[in-house]
Image (cartoon, rainbow, N blue to C red):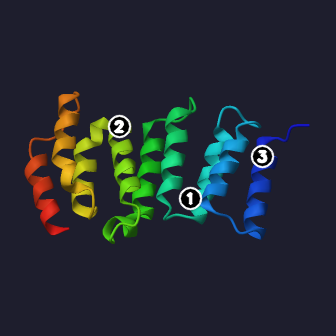
């Protein structure tokens, strides 16, 4: 007999309380949960628990946002996705400003943010320029690529990004 999504989520929570979990186990549970709930709503809830337990794990935030974007429920809007992305940025702030132990994943998280929220590209580029120590060598080219692909950024983004890069 198949379990209900609620019962499965309770099992994941209980397992988390009694066993050491790892980010990759949480991702596997999210993948496994799709057999119980093909809508991926349970997978999103599993990833919410995962990011609660490991808030600084960029890989979990990427996977969570990816699921949320690709399996957006009818009652969800872009603000829900923006909230997930914003929470990821808050939770990973230490990683952004340290010597960046996960720089490629942080770059991917920023790029995913721009892909999901092109109307907020200026804000995302400026945040990245002001916080990420590694990977900003190509930021000007990425801004230009976005502009070439129809993404609108404010006219002062180039000098602001250059100023932000100087102070990081």
- CB-based contact (under 8 Å), mark 1 and mark 2: no
Q: Residues within 10 Å of mark 3 (few under 14, many from 20)?
A: few
Which residue does the image show at 22% across and 42% down from the upper left? Answer: 142
Label of residue 51 in the image: 1
Residue 126 pos. (x, y %) = 22, 53
Q: Quadrant of the N terminus?
A: top right
Q: Which quadrant of the rendered structure holds the C terminus?
A: bottom left
Determine crowd level at label 1: few under 14, some 14-19, many 20+ residues with C-alpha closer than 10 A.
Answer: many
- The picture quadrant where one finds residue 44 is top right
The residue that mark 3 highlights is: 6
Dot 2 corresponds to which residue? 115
- The reply to whether residue 152 is visible in this rendering is no
The tag earlier along the polypeptide, 3 or 1, is: 3
Task: Name the N-terminal-most of marks 1 and 2.
Answer: 1
Q: Mark 3 or mark 1: which is in front?
A: 1
Disc 2 on helix, strand or loop? helix
Of mark 2 and mark 3, the one earlier in the sequence is 3
Query: Picture coordinates of residue 109 (x, y %)?
Result: 39, 49
């Amino acid at each position: 007999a198949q379990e209900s999504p609620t019962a499965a989520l309770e099992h994941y929570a209980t397992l988390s309380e009694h066993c050491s979990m790892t980010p990759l186990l949480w991702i596997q549970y999210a993948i496994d949960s799709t057999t119980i709930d093909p809508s991926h709503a349970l997978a999103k809830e599993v990833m919410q628990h995962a990011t609660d337990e490991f808030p600084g794990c960029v890989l979990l935030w990427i996977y969570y946002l990816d699921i949320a974007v690709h399996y957006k429920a009818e009652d969800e809007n872009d603000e829900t996705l923006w909230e997930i992305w914003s929470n990821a940025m808050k939770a990973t702030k230490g990683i952004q400003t340290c010597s960046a132990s996960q720089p490629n994943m942080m770059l991917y998280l920023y790029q995913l943010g721009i892909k999901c929220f092109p109307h907020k590209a200026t804000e995302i580029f400026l945040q990245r320029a002001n916080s990420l120590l590694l990977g900003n060598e190509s930021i000007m080219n990425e801004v230009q690529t976005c502009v070439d692909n129809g993404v609108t950024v404010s006219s002062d983004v180039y000098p602001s990004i250059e100023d932000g890069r100087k102070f990081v």
